[in-house]
Image: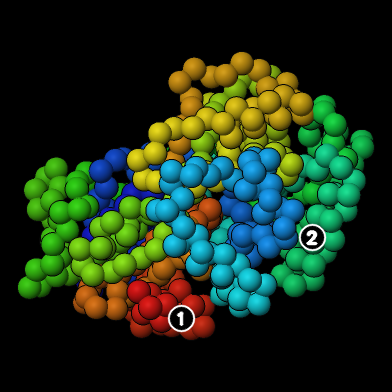
Amino acid sequence: MAEFIVLGAGMVGIGAALALQARGHAVTVLDRSAPGTETSHGNAGVIQAEAVEPYAIPRDLATLFSYATGQSNDVLWHLRDLPAVAPALWRYFRHSAPARHAVLSKGYAPLVLSATADHAPLIAASESEALIRRTGLGELYRTARALDAAAANAERMRDRYGLGSEVLTGSALAEAEPALNGPLAGMLLWTDSWSSSDPGALTRAYADLFLARGGRVLTGDATSLTETGSGWTVESSEGPVEASDVVVALGPWSPDLLAPLGYRIHMIWKRGYHGHFNAPTPLNRPCLDDANGIVMSSMTRGLRITTGAELVGRNAPRTLRQLERGQRAARELLDLGAPVPDSTWHGHRPCLPDMLPLVGAAPRHRGLWFDFGHGHQGFTLGPTTGRLLADIVEGQTDAVTAALSPALRGV
């Protein structure tokens, strides 16, 4: 069996480490931070069983106009950063064409449909049930027209993918979410999705499981990765670590690591923010406010508001416009309470233009493996792509793994 270094201690890296370990490989995880303290900590905590079609750029002129003029809170962009993000954004727009998106969805849907089943044994083995809610994901709509359109799409998704959903209005909505008291036409409830009250803690619980099974987690500098005659070496706080194989699971930082090795990977950094509030009545599930591009979810630290996408350069200054606008919108729907001190955070989603994660063997280096580019779904898909990567390492491939292959996608 091979010895692996996994670079990255988020949900994706820990998912890969557990899967490789389960196949008998010796695995060391290395990151600059402790497990689950970066992007895997800051998301909305949803294991999104309903997200079977990747998020495409809309094609209708009204939505694009709202993005361009700043009317929508879903997307924020800055003229200063546009030259840097434009090439990848243009590729993203081309892949969002309906025919191309339909093809991509065929490769993407099986991943998401496996997500809860892949998380389930890890939740049980890590004794993390207290962190999990199986109450679904709510989408909140303020107009009957928007709710009807969402319900029609949910019927399409049920027919195509078998996804469960319900439309709740009036007293049914009040019973499902007593905290909501604002102007709503109703809620579309995706019944198959799960969520966590602390996504960072769940990632750390999986990391503890990996340690209990004999793995190692070290602090170190992933950029020190060097190819040797027998494999790879990287510097850690405990000295050099050597292995025959290395997995790059560094999310948005993966292209920077791989560029010196000759891999040019176009990636869109979608920055997201969150803040916590002392809401007196918790929500029973994460709820998306469709009109305002935020997800509200009750967490161990309070009610968390997470934002949509800010298209920025790597070192752009923090902009709280989306979070502040989302906070005002949330106060229209529930008693939000006071902000939790020092709870504002931002991180970056690693989105590839074709919306599929890169999972598989690097085309030009023996023993180098990719597992990154999960976009909005790293928390959802970490265990799933880890399992698929372990399959690929053992020579097991199929149509789904082929769709994710770096070599077939011209990396």
Q: How is the image coloured?
A: rainbow
Picture coordinates of residue 128, whole percent (x, y): 50, 43
In this rendering, the answer to whether 410 lies above or below 222 is below
Q: Residue at x 43, y 46 (%)?
A: 81
**Disc sitting over residue 268 in the figure:** none
Q: Residue at x 74, y 41 (%)?
A: 291
The quarter holding residue 302 reads: top right
Q: Label 1: how many residues lie within 10 Å, few (<14), some (14-19) or many (20+)?
A: some
Alpha carbon distance from label 2 to label 1:
29 Å
SS under mark 2: helix
Task: State how many labels appear.
Answer: 2
**Disc sitting over residue 154 in the figure:** 2
Picture coordinates of residue 42, whole percent (x, y): 48, 39
In this rendering, the answer to whether 126 lies above or below 247 is above
- Amino acid carrying mark 1 in the image: Ala
Name the quadrant of the N terminus. Answer: bottom left
Residue 245 as seen in the image, left or right of residue 36: left
Picture coordinates of residue 41, whole percent (x, y): 45, 40
Residue 348 as seen in the image, left or right of residue 176: left
| Labelled pair 2, 1 in contact (Cβ < 8 Å) | no
Picture coordinates of residue 247, whole percent (x, y): 29, 64
Name the quadrant of the C terminus. Answer: bottom left
**Disc sitting over residue 402 in the figure:** 1
SS under mark 1: helix
Q: Label 2: how many residues lie within 10 Å, few (<14), some (14-19) or many (20+)?
A: many
Q: Is residue 382 visible?
A: no
Sequence-wise first label, 2 or 1 = 2
Q: Residue at x 71, y 70 (%)?
A: 161
Q: Residue at x 25, y 43 (%)?
A: 32
Give whichever of 93, 25 is nearer the camera.
93
Give whichever of 317, 279 is nearer the camera.
317
